[in-house]
Image (tube, rainbow, N blue to C red):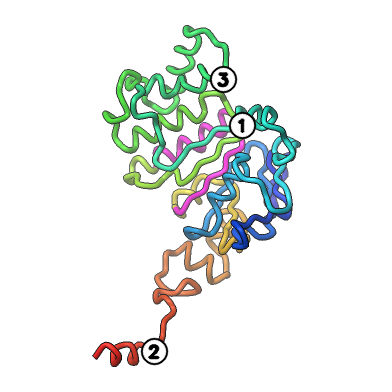
Amino acid sequence: MILTAPALVEIRDLNFAYDKRPILQGINMTFPKGKLIAIMGLSGCGKTTLLRHIGGALKPTSGHIKVGGEILHELDQDGLYAMRRKMGMLFQFGALFTDMSVYDNVAFQMREHTDLPEELIHDLVMMKLNAVGLRGTHNLMPSELSGGMARRVALARTVALDPMLIMYDEPFAGLDPISLTVVGDLIRRLNDALGATSIIVTHDIQESLKIVDYVYFMANGVIEAEGTPGEIRASGKQFVHQFVHGEMDGPVPFHYPGGDYRQDLSLRA
């Protein structure tokens, strides 16, 4: 890996299975401090399952994940909760609390995990909202926001406690082109401003390759390819090429495997 900064997250020989069905197989990844890394691949290839491991929601069948020098699955409950307070998570479609105002959504973690006075929480909330361009929405309810605005409020909530590690699960899903560009730019700028490490799970090739430092490309629970955005764009691997360029046919076929087409038609006749 060409990124030489010290590692914040290290994944070594990670395997995971639901019962006997393998999901992740021999995963090795490194996420350096201060960098923005994308994990890409088709639906069902194990990307979100990997995020759940990094957040400590799942334990590996074998191998380990080390965050900040600590092996996650060896932490007790208090240790895991302490580690999670250093993480931020932007869920698909934002997942704002619908019965709370924008202000209270962003203030939620500060009230839950700190003893800060309300005066200071107020200033911090307004600063986070200002960072995403939405200070004027603090009294609105989530139902009064557009999809792009809701995603930006969710981003402000994600960075409320200045986490060392920020994870994004499909942050661009459902956004219009303008909102998509705005959110992508915010992800890059907030990562750099906080000195955080960010991991993006995404299908959005073009926007992601503009902002990330490195890419891991997954298929069927293994790492199919990795490299800088330029290396991924120029990859000679057929599977990666098909995914990056959005081609209909290739290693991922258009037709689901089936019997002889003419025979199927004659049987129906």
State which tag comes first along the sequence, 2 or 1. Answer: 1
State which tag comes first along the sequence, 1 or 3. Answer: 1
Q: To which residue does mark 3 refer? A: 113
Task: Tell me which residue sits at (32%, 38%) in the image.
Answer: 147
Q: What amino acid does circle 1 point to?
A: Arg
> Would you place residue 22 above or below residue 128 in this image?
below
Q: What amino acid does circle 2 point to?
A: Asp
Q: Return the residue nearer the eye: 137 or 178.
A: 137
Q: Please identify the dominant SS of the magenta region.
A: helix
Badge number at residue 260:
2
Task: Give how far apart the Cα atoms at labels 3 and 2 are.
Answer: 61 Å
Q: To which residue does mark 1 refer? A: 84
Q: Is residue 195 visible?
A: no
Asked whether 109 falls inside the magenta stretch, the response is no
| Total tally of numbered discs in the picture | 3
Task: Give how far apart the Cα atoms at labels 1 and 3 are.
Answer: 11 Å
Task: Tell me which residue sits at (41%, 86%) in the image.
Answer: 259
Task: Give how far apart the Cα atoms at labels 2 and 1 are.
Answer: 53 Å
SS assignment at label 2: loop
Q: Is residue 85 left or right of residue 133?
A: right
Residue stretch in magenta: 181-203
Q: Badge 1 local density, few (<14 within 10 Å), some, or many (20+)?
A: some
Q: What amino acid does circle 3 point to?
A: His
